[in-house]
């Protein structure tokens, strides 16, 4: 902060006075306590949980191992990690868990679970349950709290009591095997006469017993999912396997950009895309720095870049992934795009994004975005709120006005999968869908391995109730090409 206030950052190569001011603003917000350091980003928590689950599944007595709580619901930040294990031998499963190689210490151990502290300071909680009751426990500890409260209110009206062990009859009711929503259905459940309890091996049967279709974990936030499940009106959510490409990938081609370069070559990116089963990718490097180049130089850089990429594509015909030669272009404070008009001839399309001056008033920021997105080749608005999770609040936009513009001009809004972003947030995804806005799930990858982060963007889309038809990069290449190259 002292260096920035002293003007020492603006003079560093690739920085400037605007970057310096952004750093000052961010650090001052940090000092005010806006940053929460006790929570993990979703990808960090997910990867850590998957390591533990992979270890647990190596034991022959572990039948299933599944994350619980906010992690299973794919919330953007996670506290501690909880894992459920289905087993007939709880003591053996717990003992195996306590031998986890990255364990630093044992916090607690009991007959139904244990807690360990990892060598990185994070806590992992294990819960074990027999297979015949696993469904009820999984539902109970997945949450959310508000979802479960609403579910229990629904159950009470039917004379039922819900718990992590199953469903108990608290008054005489009519039991049926039909699909009537007003009667308790008992298919695939086991009745424990001693406890007066119906036990469920999986969640689907648990929800069905209450007259509901199964509710995906990502939707369990008490925002209308229970009402929709009662009417069999839940969306058929987009899945990772529906994704056919990624528009927002940064390569290591040095076009002397305004921001950071990628770290992988086009060849490496193409190979990864083929492994992921993609039909197409977009290389969207940051635009060349306007402060360091003339308009003629920028146009020449982009022309040579296109020639270089086309040469690679012609020599790698064994890879069937198609390439869109794109660019991520800054929207300047006045809404202008910092590349000359003739430079657009070297581009199939562009993603436009905000990278500076985040504190503009709502109207001015909305004007800025719409002006930048108005260029015929500007097809996607990238990381649209500008938030960095736990680091920076997003800027203010008149969302209805932006939605109206995007719908009228056939523009798309990005769901950015990058761990610090997960942007568009799920709440706004749902609003965009209500407004029939096209959405693109991208990774903003800066190296080929990061292309696997797509799963987190898909999870945001699912939490926003997105279906396959809401996402443009679920479309096959010819359809995407038709939309992307339509100016």
Image (cartoon, rainbow, N blue to C red):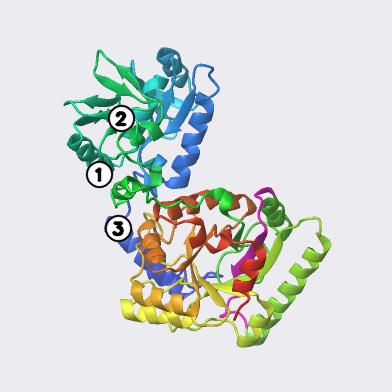
Residue placed at 67% from the left, 67% from the top?
478
User: Which segment did they paint magenta?
Assistant: 275-293
Q: Say what secondary structure mark 1 lies in.
A: helix
Residue placed at 41% from the left, 43% from the top?
216
Vertical side of 22 occupied by 226: above or below: above
Is residue 281 part of the magenta span, yes or no? yes
Q: Is residue 40 visible?
A: no
Indicate the quadrant where residue 303 lies. Answer: bottom right
Vertical side of 346 occupied by 249: above or below: above
Q: What is the spatial separation of the Cα atoms under label 1 and label 2, in whole angstroms?
A: 28 Å
Q: Nearer the viewer, mark 1 or mark 2?
A: 2
Q: Which residue carries the number 3 mark? A: 31
Position of residue 313 measured from the top left corner of the image (x, y, whole percent): 77, 64
Indicate the quadrant where residue 408 lies. Answer: bottom left
- Which circle's residue, 3 or 1, is located before the other in the chain? 3
Q: Say what secondary structure mark 3 lies in.
A: helix
Vertical side of 15 occupied by 337: above or below: below
Q: Which residue carries the number 2 mark? A: 176
Disc 2 crowd, CA 10 A, few/some/many (<14, 14-19, 20+): some
Q: Quadrant of the N terminus?
A: bottom left
Indicate the quadrant where residue 143 lies. Answer: top left
- Which circle's residue, 2 or 3, is located before the other in the chain? 3
Residue placed at 34% from the left, 29% from the top?
136
Q: Nearer the viewer, mark 2 or mark 3?
A: 2
Is residue 484 part of the magenta span, yes or no? no
Q: Quadrant of the C terminus?
A: bottom right
Position of residue 32 measured from the top left corner of the image (x, y, whole percent): 26, 58
Disc 3 crowd, CA 10 A, few/some/many (<14, 14-19, 20+): few
């Amino acid at each position: 902060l002292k260096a920035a206030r002293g003007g020492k950052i603006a003079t560093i190569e690739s920085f400037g006075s605007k970057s310096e001011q952004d750093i000052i603003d961010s650090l001052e917000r940090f000092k005010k306590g806006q940053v929460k350091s006790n929570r993990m980003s979703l990808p960090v928590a997910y990867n850590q949980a998957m390591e533990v689950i992979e270890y647990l599944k190596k034991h022959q007595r572990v039948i299933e191992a599944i994350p619980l709580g906010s992690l299973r619901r794919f919330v953007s930040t996670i506290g501690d990690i909880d894992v459920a294990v289905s087993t007939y031998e709880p003591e053996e499963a717990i003992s195996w868990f306590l031998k986890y190689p990255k364990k630093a210490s044992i916090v607690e151990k009991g007959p139904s679970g244990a807690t360990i502290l990892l060598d990185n300071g994070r806590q992992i909680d294990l819960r074990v349950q027999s297979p015949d009751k696993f469904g009820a426990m999984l539902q109970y500890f997945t949450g959310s709290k508000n979802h479960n409260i609403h579910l229990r209110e629904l159950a009470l009206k039917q004379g039922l009591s819900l718990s992590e062990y199953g469903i108990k009859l608290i008054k005489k009711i009519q039991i049926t095997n039909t699909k009537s929503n007003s009667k308790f259905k008992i298919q695939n459940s086991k009745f424990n006469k001693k406890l007066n309890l119906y036990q469920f091996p999986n969640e689907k049967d648990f929800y069905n017993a209450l007259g509901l279709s199964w509710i995906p974990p990502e939707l369990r936030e008490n925002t209308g999912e229970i009402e929709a499940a009662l009417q069999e009106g839940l969306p058929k959510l987009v899945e990772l396997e529906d994704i056919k490409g990624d528009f927002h990938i940064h390569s290591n081609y040095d076009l002397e950009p305004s921001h950071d370069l990628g770290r992988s070559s086009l060849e490496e990116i193409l190979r990864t895309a083929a492994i992921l089963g993609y039909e197409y990718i977009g290389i969207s490097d940051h635009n060349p720095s306007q402060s360091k180049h003339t308009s003629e130089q920028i146009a020449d850089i982009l022309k040579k870049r296109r020639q270089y990429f086309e040469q690679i594509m012609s020599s790698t015909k064994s890879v069937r992934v198609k390439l869109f030669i794109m660019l991520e272009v800054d929207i300047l404070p006045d809404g202008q795009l910092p590349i000359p008009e003739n430079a657009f001839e070297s581009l199939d399309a562009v993603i436009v994004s905000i990278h500076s001056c985040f504190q503009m008033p709502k109207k001015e920021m909305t004007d800025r975005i719409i002006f930048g997105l108005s260029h015929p080749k500007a097809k996607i608005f990238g990381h649209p709120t500008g938030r960095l999770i736990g680091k920076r609040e997003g800027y203010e936009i008149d969302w209805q006005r932006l939605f109206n513009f995007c719908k009228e001009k056939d523009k798309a809004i990005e769901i950015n999968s990058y761990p610090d972003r997960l942007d568009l947030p799920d709440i706004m995804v749902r609003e965009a869908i209500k407004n029939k806005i096209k959405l693109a799930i991208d990774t903003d990858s800066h190296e080929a391995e990061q292309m696997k982060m797509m799963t987190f963007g898909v999870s945001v889309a699912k939490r926003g109730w997105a279906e396959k038809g809401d996402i443009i990069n679920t479309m096959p290449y010819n359809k995407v090409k038709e939309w992307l190259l339509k100016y």
